Image (cartoon, rainbow, N blue to C red):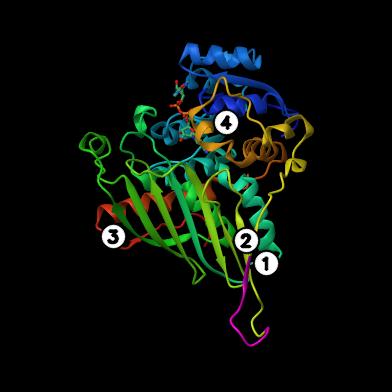
Amino acid sequence: MTGKISIAVVGMGFGAEFAAIYNRHPAVERCIVVDQSAERLAAVADRFDIAERRASLDDVLGDPSIDAVHIATGIPDHAAQTLETLRAGKHCACAVPMATTIDELHQIVAAVETSECCYMMMETTVFDRAFLWVQAQHEAGRFGEIQMLRGAHYQDMENWPPYWAGLPPMWYATHAVSPPLALADTRAEAVHCFGSGRMRGELQAHYDNPFPIETALFELEGTPAVLEVTRALFHSARPYIESFNVYGSDATFEWQQHNTDLPVIFDLSPLGEGDGPRRTSGTRIELPDYADRLPDEIARFTRRGVYDDSVPHLSFTHGGGHGGSRPHLCHEFVSAIADGRKPTVDEIRGANWTAPGICAHESAIRGGRRVDVPRFGGP
Ligand SMILES: NC(=O)c1ccc[n+]([C@@H]2O[C@H](COP(=O)([O-])OP(=O)(O)OC[C@H]3O[C@@H](n4cnc5c(N)ncnc54)[C@H](O)[C@@H]3O)[C@@H](O)[C@H]2O)c1
């Protein structure tokens, strides 16, 4: 693609963060903000001085001057709105999860192929500064062989928008599943998952889901390592955390217990060094920022959201800014369109990171039975 792009961001809750970043990105000519709530739309557009405003996704899809759409609407709308966007011939980025059924994942993969547009799943955790640091250590060989991986995401979703009420925890597992799969450069082949705990009846009705917590073991392709993932959404007294741990033969990375702490790396003394037991040393890590990978115009957003304390968005109150990931996500989507290439989290990776959670919930409903996870892409 030649020239700058025009991008519409739909959904002015979480989407507001991205709109403000696109609006300053040097490769973006126009940023258009969209929400069916006139109040929400005006509040964001006025605050960030964005002139172009639309009331619905439909207004955007019929406008040939708009190249790309970033969908930041509620979970049940993601798949249908992604398909509409791609079928309208526009590049599409979408908040996680990519979809909530395997059939929808197949439809999106097919729609990308037909449209020849870019699709990107906006997975924050694989652009988080902790992930970027661990990835660099792994590439340098520090972990040795990866022996086991673990992901966990605990977040109480009481009183969030109504579609959250009773959501199967594993349908929103990508924050816990994606970093381990990305690091091990693999996909989940099969899963055993159990539902855990008791959820009050009123929350069970919406999705016919009895489980406030789900915990799963995934078999991974091409490695003897296993991935263990736990997701909690309701009735569990654990503060918010999105985390992953990597257990290697030479070193281990463990996420901090509190978001205010620092993560730890443990190194194991070399095999054959001395006669006694092997020694482990643990070091807390001051993570570098990686803002130097971004254009100057948006680099400051790794440290600071566009909201301040007077206008907190719920997920930032919980999330503390998602590890500086948001400007990296915007930059990757815009750059992929400009370069005419696939984004790093394209439709295949997005599907391979979303399907494990969908299959895990199916396993939990079937009492922990083994469920094969379909493969997207590859041979
Ligand atoms: N770390 C992360 O990746 C992360 C963090 C927070 C939220 N999210 C995801 O982002 C999404 C948005 O989260 P939120 O908390 O802002 O949700 P929300 O429900 O508060 O906001 C969604 C907005 O989309 C608007 N909308 C829906 N359909 C529309 C349409 N057709 N046209 C115009 N506007 C439309 C609604 O009016 C609403 O204002 C969710 O799917 C959530 O899962 C991801």
Q: Nearer the viewer, mark 2 or mark 3?
A: 2
Q: Which residue is mark 2?
A: 265
The answer to the question of whether label 1 and label 2 lie on touching residues, with beta carbons closer than 8 A, is yes
- Residue 335 quadrant: top right
Q: Residue at x 61, y 20 (%)?
A: 32
User: Is residue 348 among what the camera can see?
Assistant: no
Q: Judge: label 1 CB < 8 Å from ligand 1.
A: no
Report the mark closest to the observer, 4 or 2: 2
The kind of residue on which mark 3 rests is Gly
Q: Earlier in the sequence, mark 2 or mark 3?
A: 2
The relative height of residue 5 versus residue 101 in the rendered view (above or below) is above
**Picture coordinates of residue 351, whole percent (x, y):** 48, 49
Graded by Cα atoms within 10 Å as few (under 14), some (14 to 19) or many (20 or more), the crowding at tag 3 reads: some
Q: Is residue 189 magenta?
A: no
Q: Position of residue 244 (x, y in %)?
A: 52, 54
Residue 280 sits inside the magenta stretch = yes
What residue lies at 28% left-to-right and 38% top-to-bottom? Answer: 207
Residue for badge 1: 142
What is the spatial separation of the Cα atoms under label 1 and label 4, in whole angstroms? 42 Å
Direction front: furthest residue = 276
- The mark lying in front, picked from 1 and 4, is 1
What SS does tag 3 mark?
loop
What crowding class fits label 4: few (fewer than 14 Cα within 10 Å), some (14-19), or many (20 or more)? many
- Residue under circle 4? 90
User: SS for tag 4?
Assistant: loop
Q: Nearer the viewer, mark 1 or mark 3?
A: 1
Of the numbered discs 1 and 2, the one sitting upstream in the chain is: 1
Question: Can you identify the residue that label 3 sits on?
Answer: 368
Q: Is residue 70 visible?
A: yes
The residue segment tinted magenta is: 273-281
Identify the residue at image location x=52%, y=69%: 222
Circle nearer the N terminus (4, 2): 4
